[in-house]
Amino acid sequence: MPVKGMGSGQDMWVNLPLDQTLPFMVSFGAAMQIRVLFPEGNEPPWTRSLNGGAKALDAFDACRKGLNPAAATQPFSPGAMPGQAPTSGAQPLIQSRA
């Protein structure tokens, strides 16, 4: 499934419309290798194995599902207007793990 990507320096990325993400992920998970071509430059193609890619996609999808709650949530009191500071003085709690 060919897609057009972009890049800058050491970074490369692709933007996919939402309706193309599932077919791309299915294709990526079933593929044995990935090939990156540079039609506008003189870089030779990059070909790499995707052995283990399906397991990585499964882990990514499990993480994605965990971040997407089944029901809408509300981080502040219902009386706060969008863009307005919460009236209760509540602040979001940010935690990190080392």
Image (cartoon, rainbow, N blue to C red):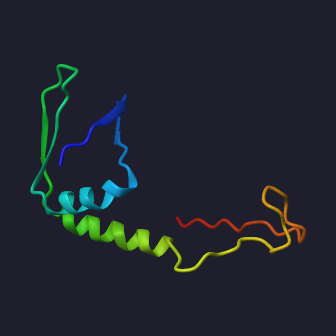
Farthest left residue in view? 32
x then y, percent, for residue 44: 13, 27
Quarter occupied by residue 73: bottom right
Residue under the image location 66 percent in, 65 percent down: 94
Q: Residue furthest front?
A: 19
Q: How many labels does the image show?
A: 0
Q: In which quarter of the image is residue 22?
A: bottom left
Residue under the point 27% across and 65% down: 57
Looking at the image, which residue is at 13% across and 46% down? 48
List the single residue furthest toward the bottom.
Answer: 70
| 48 versus 85 height, above or below | above
**In front of the other: 21 or 57:** 21
Task: Indicate whether 32 appears above or below 70.
Answer: above
Residue 85 image-quadrant placement: bottom right
Q: Is residue 23 visible?
A: yes
Question: Which residue sits at x=52%, y=80%?
Answer: 70
24 sits to left or right of 64: left
Task: Give the percent coordinates (x, y) of residue 6.
Answer: 34, 33
* Whether residue 10 can be seen here: no
Residue 42, relative to residue 30: is it above or below?
above
